[in-house]
Each structure stands twice: as C-alpha cells, then as structure tokens.
Image: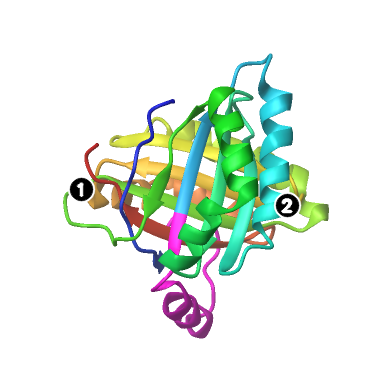
Amino acid sequence: MKKNIFLMAIAAIAMISCGPKAAPEQKAQNEEADAAVIRINCPLKVTPENRDKVLALCKELVDSSRTDAGNIDYDIYESATDPASLIIFETWQDQPSLDAHMAAPHFTRLVPQIQEASEMAIQVMTEKPQEGKPLRINCMLDVPQENREAAIELYKVHVSESLKDDGVIDFDLYLSATNPEKMMIFETWKNEDVLEAHATAEHSKNHIAQIKDKAQSKLEKFLLPEE
C-alpha cells in the first residue's frame, strides 16, 4: 500500500490572498459552522496511462460518499496546471461520521483501487495553525460560469507569481471535476510570516483587484505538522 501521510488541523476562516472577502456576519457564521468539522485533503499523483481510470474511480467515490450520513462536502479536483495532480476534498460533521464512511462498502471497494493506480496522501485536518509551523490553506472558490475562463487565466498568473514567493511549499489552482463553478487554491507555506508577506505582496494585491468581481472565496487555514 502506498504511504499515507496524516496531517492534523482545525479550520480557522480568514480571507488573505485568494479573492474578495465575505461579509463580517457571513464570516462569523462560517467560523461557528466549521469549528467542529473534520477536513480531509487527499492529493493524488497519477500517470497519463492511469489518469482516466483514477478520475472515474474518484467520481464514483464522490457520488457514493455524498450520500453518507454526516458528509458536508465531497469532491474531486483536477490541477489546472499539472494533469498528473488530483485532490479528493472532503468535509465531515464529526469523527463517527468519518469512521462510518471509511467502513462503507463503496469506500473499502474503491479506495484500494485508487491507491493501487496512484500515489495518494491522506491528510486529516483537525487542529488550528500554530506559530512558526508550516500551514496548509484551502481557498474555496465559487465562480459563475460566465466568469470561468477569465478567472482561470487570472488564477494561473497568480499561481505562477506566488510560486516565486519566499517560504512557499505548494501553490496551485484546482478545478472541480463535478461542478464547473467550483475551484480551489491549494497552498502550503512554511509559516504564518511568509504567508503574510505573500498576502501583502504587490502581485497578490493586483490579483485581488482583478478577481474580486469574478469569484467569491473562503480561505481555511490548517496546521501542517511534521511527518
């Protein structure tokens, strides 16, 4: 079995560099709703030969898992810059819901097939960031269909510029394989200080000014502990 990497984190909602901010009252509601949930990122690396097979298996897993009790969100995302990179994105109401999902027939049947055909890291996030520690960001994007192509091009430029920033570990744009209006910026930073420098960089400010009328975003930060 491929190596599974377990990350610990709890969502702390904030808006920094990926798009326009939510209203204060909506932000408060988001923080309260997300305080107890479990977030999972499963980055996948696939070969050209296996990509279609893995994507089909993931879509089947998504369809079945969305009906599981306690599921809040479940989707498969494709990198907009690297066809070898996919991410299974999950949010669960609580640990019993996640445990039941992992014991479900569709999970025990499909996940081993996905792992066999790809390199998978299972990242379970239930703790907030700590000072000086690496952190993971999921910036969830809602983009109307009429803005999709323009938004993708703007985000690709932002990805290219952000990958040059000091302290960046990962930075990419992912597109939902099931909903054309859903996207995600997937980021990993060495610590909060380098993230703050990125957020206040001129290219980030320019990006926010360009994208603010094309997408709505919600940024979630998680602790990324040592392996």
Q: Element type at marker 1?
A: loop
State which mark lies toward you, 1 or 2.
Answer: 2
Q: Pinpoint residue 222: horizontal percent, then vertical percent.
A: 34, 55
Disc 1 marks a residue whose amino acid type is Lys
Left or right: 130 as drawn, with respect to 222: left
Q: Nearer the viewer, residue 4 or 106?
A: 106
Q: Are marks 1 and 2 in contact (CB under 8 Å)?
A: no
Q: Which mark is residue 133?
A: 1
Count of marks placed on residues = 2
Task: Please determine whether, in this image, residue 25 is positioned above or below residue 155.
Answer: below
As drawn, the residue found furthest toward the bottom would be: 25
Answer with mark 1 or mark 2, whichever residue precedes in sequence: 2
Q: Which mark is residue 63?
A: 2
Name the image quarter holding residue 221.
Answer: bottom left
Q: Pinpoint residue 217: horizontal percent, then vertical percent.
A: 57, 61
| Residue 18 is one of the magenta-drawn residues | yes
Q: Element type at marker 2?
A: helix
| Residue drawn at the location 49% of the way across and 41% of the way down | 42
**Quadrant of the rendering where the N terminus is positioned:** top left
Per the rendered image, the range of residues in magenta is 14-39
Q: Nearer the viewer, residue 184 or 20?
A: 184
Residue 26 appears in view = yes
**Quadrant of the rendering where the C terminus is positioned:** top left
Disc 2 marks a residue whose amino acid type is Asp
As drawn, the residue found furthest toward the top would be: 49
Q: Pinpoint residue 198: horizontal percent, then vertical percent.
A: 36, 46
